[in-house]
Image: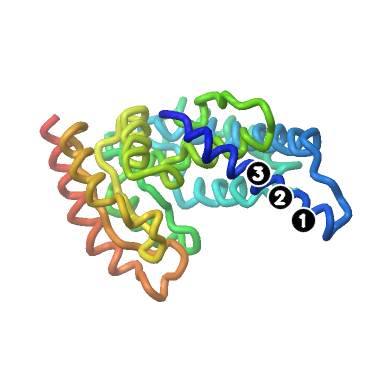
Amino acid sequence: AGYADALRVRSLAQEIKNLAEVFRRVTGHELTEAAIEQGVEKYRTLRGMYYEIQDLLKADPMPLSTKDFGIIGLAVLSCPKRTIRGGPDAGKILIAELKQRIARGEGVMPKGAPRVMIILPHLSDPAITGVVEDAGLAIIVTLRSPVWDKVPSPYESIWEKAADQNLRRGSRHSLTSMVTEIKDIAQAYQVDGIIIDTIAKCRVYTFYPLKAKQIIEKELGIPVLPLEHDPYDTREYSVERFKSRIEPFAEILKARKKQQ
């Protein structure tokens, strides 16, 4: 993990400040650094709960379906006031239940199922994410992980910290950074394979998959499945189409698992 270029950070920080000024003129409310820091701290608590659940998915068997975990991820990402207020306490209840399941050896997938990273769980239809689990693969991590978020920012102002956190992520940085981020997460979670299901209409997510497959398979020695996808609109990408690509990939991972 590396830091974003300082010039780009300053430029984006200034754009954020400009947006805050527009917000003040339109609403009459000023977004001070203190107010933003207060909001960031509340979000940090919420995100910490999300990451704690994320780490529990490493257990074998996996104790929570990604279809359910994905809903938590969407709530954290959208960050509505109700989630900020009640999310951490609700998360504590779920975390306690998941730890009990792990202690009892209970899970939603068979013990020893191949463990995979998926870049984007489906954002509107859990049935499509369910295809992966139905094929016998345990999704234990997505691109939204704590691996790179744990890198401290060298900047002092809240504006530059926000810009740095955004620009250091692979999707905002470069092809090399994107591949490195995926590799770092895959190694941290010791996955057996990676599904790069990119947003077909988004340039940010279409410029790296084939190169990522080439590099990761060579350097990490694990299979990578790149495929065009639409994680929003099932009218363009159906369950059946997703299944036709996932099931053969799952058989490859299962065969490799038996040989280990």
Q: Quadrant of the C terminus?
A: top left
Q: Quadrant of the N terminus?
A: top left
Q: Residues within 10 Å of mark 1 (few under 14, many from 20)?
A: few
Residue at x-position 38% and y-position 74%: 236
Q: Is residue 98 visible?
A: no
Q: Label 2 near label 1: C-beta < 8 Å? A: yes
Residue of label 1? 22
Residue that sits furthest to the front in the current view: 7
Residue of label 2? 18
Say which amino acid is labelled 2: Asn
Kindly report the distance in space between the C-alpha atoms of the residues bearing marks 1 and 3. 12 Å
Q: Residues within 10 Å of mark 3 (few under 14, many from 20)?
A: some
Q: Residues within 10 Å of mark 2 (few under 14, many from 20)?
A: few
Kindly report the distance in space between the C-alpha atoms of the residues bearing marks 3 and 2. 6 Å
Q: Secondary structure at mark 1?
A: helix
Residue 34: percent from the left, percent from the top? 80, 33
Residue of label 3? 14
Q: Label 2 near label 3: C-beta < 8 Å? A: yes
Q: Is residue 25 above or below residue 235?
A: above
Say which amino acid is labelled 1: Val
